[in-house]
Amino acid sequence: MKKPTSFQQQAISKKKNIYPVRPLLMDYLREHQRAISLPVTYQELRHFSGAVPVRDKKGKDTLWEAALYPQSEITHIHTALKSIYAILKTGGDTSVHKHLLVDRIDYCTFGNSNPFRVRIVNDFNDNYDYFYIKQADASRIYGLELEHILSPSRIHYYVNEQTLVEEHIAGIPGDQFLAHHLSNAEFNKVRIAKEFVKFNERCLVRLLGDMRSYNYVFDITPDFEEVQFRIRAIDFDQQSYEGKRTLYQPQFFKENLALVQLTLQLLTKETIQQYQKEERTMIARRSISSHHRLSQLLEVMQSDPISHADKIKQLAKELGTYYHTPNFESCQSMGDIVHVSLRQLTDSLQS
């Protein structure tokens, strides 16, 4: 890992297309219990009558708005949202969720997917949780599936025609962690640097782009001696879309500069290579253990036009140069590129 000399060329497409969920992908989702009926859709939630800006504890605009609905529709919407929460958490059993309330329905005007964020509150103890309702985007669904199969963490989501429901991924947002927690004297900075190297490798191998600091969270787990860190992506809109290789490597975003500097300060080149190898080995093992499901997903992805021909050609060329291999030359789709990227790992592990 080298410190980037310039961030000027890290240009993410301003507005990525929302790619439809095609029949083959929907068949895959049904087979793996990801496609279900929902009592309310994304488009229905868009029919709010007003909105109030949501501000954080310091009064700063969060770019979210609390959606306001006509009184005649609130009961139906709240009941439907509690049912969706039950689907996410208890397989649809609503008997244990009678004490839950829909506290707020937020709408985000920033980004590609314009999601709704639903805040659920336990009426007994005021504990709260979130989940999200978004437009169903094929790129994002591929990103969620690859995260579920290849990352250290499982993730729950469901699709109903053009509506996508996602669970909340808990953690400290990356930008907040870097601003307020990176200097914590009780944290072992080597462990933070190690996890950043591994996260960087995970993103590149499975081609998840745009991992700027506000698109991932730090999941902190107390251990018997120190705390463990895991970086988890929370935005999957830029799965296998852009053509520039460095857009799939978090180390090249200026928002992550503090982590790059920390890594280069604390880890030697040999140690970085060791952690990269460790992560690639773990991804290869997950690929092999989930071979049938992953093969099904990639077969669908290879036939799905989720990017532009020029971006596919550029990325295949840049990855071929980066890995010093001609294996990417025949790639005709982003699914082809992901397939070759993962095959390199499994072939290396099995050889």
Image (cartoon, rainbow, N blue to C red):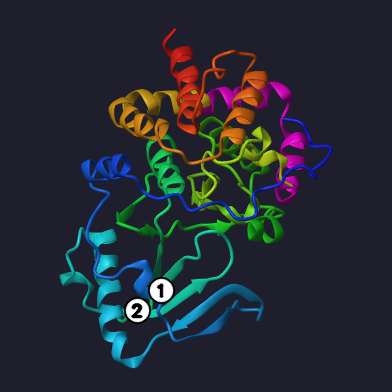
Q: Tell me the tag on residue 102.
A: 2
Front residue (pair 206, 170) = 206
Where residue 80 appears, x then y in whole percent?
26, 74
State the residue lying farthest toward the front.
309
> CA–CA distance between discs 1 and 2?
6 Å
Tag 1 near tag 2, CB within 8 Å: yes
Residue 118 position (above or below residue 283): below
N-terminal-most mark, 1 or 2: 2
Magenta region's main secondary structure? helix
Where residue 227 appears, x then y in whole percent?
54, 47
Front residue (pair 23, 225) = 23
Q: In the picture, residue 116 is in which quadrant?
A: bottom left
What stretch of residues is rendered in magenta?
254-279
Q: Helix, strand or loop at disc 2?
A: strand
Based on the picture, tell me whether residue 276 belongs to the magenta stretch.
Answer: yes
Residue 69 position (above or below residue 224): below
Q: Helix, strand or loop at disc 1?
A: strand
Q: Is residue 276 left or right of residue 260?
A: left
Where residue 142 appears, x then y in whole percent?
42, 42
Residue at screen point 46% across, 58% down = 170
Residue at screen point 48% across, 41% down = 306
Q: Tell me the tag on residue 119.
A: 1
Based on the picture, tell me whether residue 42 belongs to the magenta stretch.
Answer: no
Residue at screen point 41% across, 47% down = 138
Q: Amino acid at mark 2?
A: Val
Mark 1 Cα shell of 10 Å, populated few (<14), some (14-19), many (≥20) = some
State the residue lying farthest toward the top.
351
